[in-house]
Image (spheres, rainbow, N blue to C red):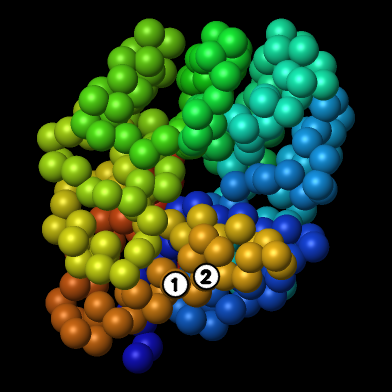
């Protein structure tokens, strides 16, 4: 079916890589009906960055990929930049934990400048490893996370959180951390959220749901803000992981085939939520930002 001309279809969190499908994946997304991508940076080489220049090169690659996607695939692409929290573990072994923390904080400040100068829209992914790590690193991980929220606060942008799966207590803790840094909780996003909780347990944090089968129908009637994402990795070693980039437009088409009246409710993740958290609204003319 043809999607409504005035309905943007947005993947809120994905990755593209020069060594992967890159723009070709964005073309597949567009062919399926997708219009807008939030493109999170990632390490584009096997080595974890150990210098600020390494991170700045990574951020520049992400921004350049976003520009190519807009030009060559006609998909609006919003860069989201930060040093990956998991990097700190390898960096601590090579540089020592304090130097690793200082490197990540410097990279966050660089990402904040990219936001302030209009080349990115958010700080992310920030937070902590999604697996058990050494207790001796906790103060450094926590220090980087706090600094990430401070940078995002000063840049006036959202912070996109990477961490373990959270229950209601976990969301409450995120909101409390935001409060201690004077970061507005309504700009805090939990990426890769797989198990919907009762609406009152999110403590003001916006969930970005992994677009697994059935999830859209489960959360469609929830009030904004909430998002859908694939966390597409664009890794040739894991084709289609986490979810294929065409997943969200396909899910949207399938839903509208069953229920054409759902189009207005789809504006919650694709229009209202973006406006509430990011401060802009994707253009109703598909594939162009307002």
Compared to residue 104, the image places residue 161 above or below, namely below
Q: Which residue corresponds to mark 2?
A: 244
Q: Which residue is drawn at 37% across and 88% down?
A: 2
Q: Check contact, mark 1 vs mark 2: CB within 8 A.
A: yes
| 87 horizontally vs 220: left or right | right
Residue 35 x, y percent position in the rendering: 49, 69
Q: Residue at x 66, y 45 (%)?
A: 41
Compared to residue 97, the image places residue 184 above or below, namely below
Residue 258 x, y percent position in the rendering: 19, 85
The answer to whether residue 38 is seen in the rendering is yes
Work out whether residue 12 or residue 92 is closer to the camera in this orientation and state it: 92
Residue 78 x, y percent position in the rendering: 57, 51
Q: Which residue is drawn at 25% across and 78% down?
A: 255
Q: Which residue lies furthest to the bottom in this view?
A: 1
Q: Quadrant of residue 93?
A: top right
| 249 horizontally vs 49: left or right | left
| 250 horizontally vs 143: left or right | left
- Disc 2 crowd rating (10 Å Cα; few below 14, some 14-19, many 20+) is some
Q: Which residue corresponds to mark 1?
A: 247
Q: Quadrant of residue 121?
A: top right
Mark number, residue 18: none
Work out whether residue 229 or residue 128 is closer to the camera in this orientation and state it: 128
Q: How many marks?
A: 2
At mark 2, the secondary structure is loop
Rounded to the nearest angstrom, the CA distance separating label 1 from label 2 is 5 Å
The answer to whether residue 70 is seen in the rendering is no
Q: In which quarter of the image is residue 71?
A: bottom right
- Disc 1 crowd rating (10 Å Cα; few below 14, some 14-19, many 20+) is many
At mark 1, the secondary structure is helix
Q: Residue at x 23, y 72 (%)?
A: 263
Quadrant into which the N terminus falls: bottom left
């Amino acid at each position: 079916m043809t999607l409504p001309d005035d309905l943007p279809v947005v993947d809120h969190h994905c990755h593209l890589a020069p060594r992967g499908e890159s723009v070709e994946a964005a073309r597949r997304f567009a062919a399926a009906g997708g219009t807008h991508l939030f493109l999170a940076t990632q390490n584009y080489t096997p080595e974890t960055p150990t210098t600020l220049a390494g991170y700045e090169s990574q951020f520049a690659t992400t921004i350049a990929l976003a520009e190519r996607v807009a030009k060559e695939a006609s998909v609006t692409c919003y860069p989201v930049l930060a040093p990956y929290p998991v990097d700190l573990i390898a960096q601590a072994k090579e540089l020592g934990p304090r130097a690793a923390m200082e490197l990540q904080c410097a990279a966050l400040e660089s990402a904040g400048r990219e936001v302030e100068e209009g080349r990115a829209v958010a700080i992310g992914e920030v937070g902590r490893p999604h697996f058990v790590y050494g207790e001796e690193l906790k103060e450094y991980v926590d220090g980087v996370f706090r600094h990430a929220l401070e940078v995002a606060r000063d840049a006036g942008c959202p912070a996109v959180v990477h961490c373990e799966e959270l229950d209601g207590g976990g969301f409450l803790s995120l909101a409390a951390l935001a409060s201690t840094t004077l970061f507005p909780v309504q700009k805090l996003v939990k990426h890769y959220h797989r198990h919907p909780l009762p609406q009152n347990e999110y403590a003001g944090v916006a969930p970005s749901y992994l677009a697994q089968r059935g999830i859209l129908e489960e959360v469609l009637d929830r009030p904004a803000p909430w998002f859908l994402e694939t966390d597409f990795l664009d890794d040739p070693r894991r084709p289609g992981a986490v979810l294929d980039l065409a997943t969200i437009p396909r899910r949207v088409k399938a839903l509208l085939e069953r229920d054409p009246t759902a189009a207005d409710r789809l504006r919650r993740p694709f229009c209202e939520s973006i406006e509430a958290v990011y401060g802009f609204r994707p253009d109703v003319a598909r594939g162009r930002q307002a």
